[in-house]
Amino acid sequence: MTVDVREREAFPLEWDNAMDLLDDVQAAAGHGTLSARPLQQLKGVAGELFDLMPVMERLRLRVPDQIALAHAAGRPITSRTA
């Protein structure tokens, strides 16, 4: 499978936008402004992103704050995340 050059160039910018949105949602969760369902959805997304951290690093993509991500995912903070 070949990825179009324009798509390959646009992806890092789109990824940054997604990470900005994640930061906003995590901030809202930290301020207690999310209801139960969005909090549960954040936990699921954060867990998936947490598992993908090695891939993001390998692709040299912007990575979320690992401690905040582990907290949002309900994962323990370890030497890997600190």
Image: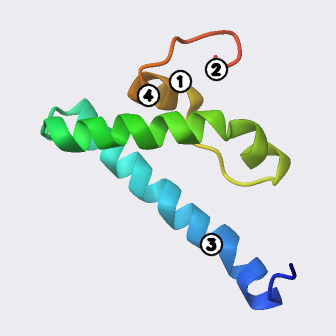
User: Dots 1 and 3: beta carbons under 8 Å?
Assistant: no
Question: Counting other residues with Cα less than 10 Å from the Cα at mark 2, is it few (<14), some (14-19), or many (20 or more)?
Answer: some
Residue 37 lies, in percent from the top left, at 18, 41
> For mark 4, what is the residue?
73
> For mark 1, what is the residue?
67
Distance (Cα) linking label 1 and label 3: 23 Å
Residue at the (42%, 50%) spot, across then down: 22
> For mark 3, what is the residue?
13
Q: At label 4, which amino acid type do we have?
A: Ala
Decide which of 71, 20 is in the foreground and name it. Answer: 71
Q: At label 2, which amino acid type do we have?
A: Thr
User: Dots 1 and 2: beta carbons under 8 Å?
Assistant: yes
Distance (Cα) linking label 2 and label 3: 25 Å
Residue at the (31%, 43%) spot, across then down: 41
Distance (Cα) linking label 4 and label 3: 24 Å
Question: Counting other residues with Cα less than 10 Å from the Cα at mark 4, is it few (<14), some (14-19), or many (20 or more)?
Answer: many
Observer-side mark, 4 or 2, equals: 4
Q: At label 3, which amino acid type do we have?
A: Leu
Residue 24 lies, in percent from the top left, at 34, 50
Q: Image quadrant for the C terminus? A: top right
Observer-side mark, 4 or 1, equals: 4
Residue 7 lies, in percent from the top left, at 72, 84
> For mark 2, what is the residue?
81
Give SS at disc 2.
loop
Distance (Cα) linking label 1 and label 2: 6 Å
Give SS at disc 1.
helix
Question: Counting other residues with Cα less than 10 Å from the Cα at mark 3, is it few (<14), some (14-19), or many (20 or more)?
Answer: few
User: Dots 2 and 3: beta carbons under 8 Å?
Assistant: no
Q: In which quarter of the image is residue 27?
A: top left
Question: Counting other residues with Cα less than 10 Å from the Cα at mark 1, is it few (<14), some (14-19), or many (20 or more)?
Answer: some
Q: At label 1, which amino acid type do we have?
A: Ile
Mark 4 or mark 1, earlier in chain: 1
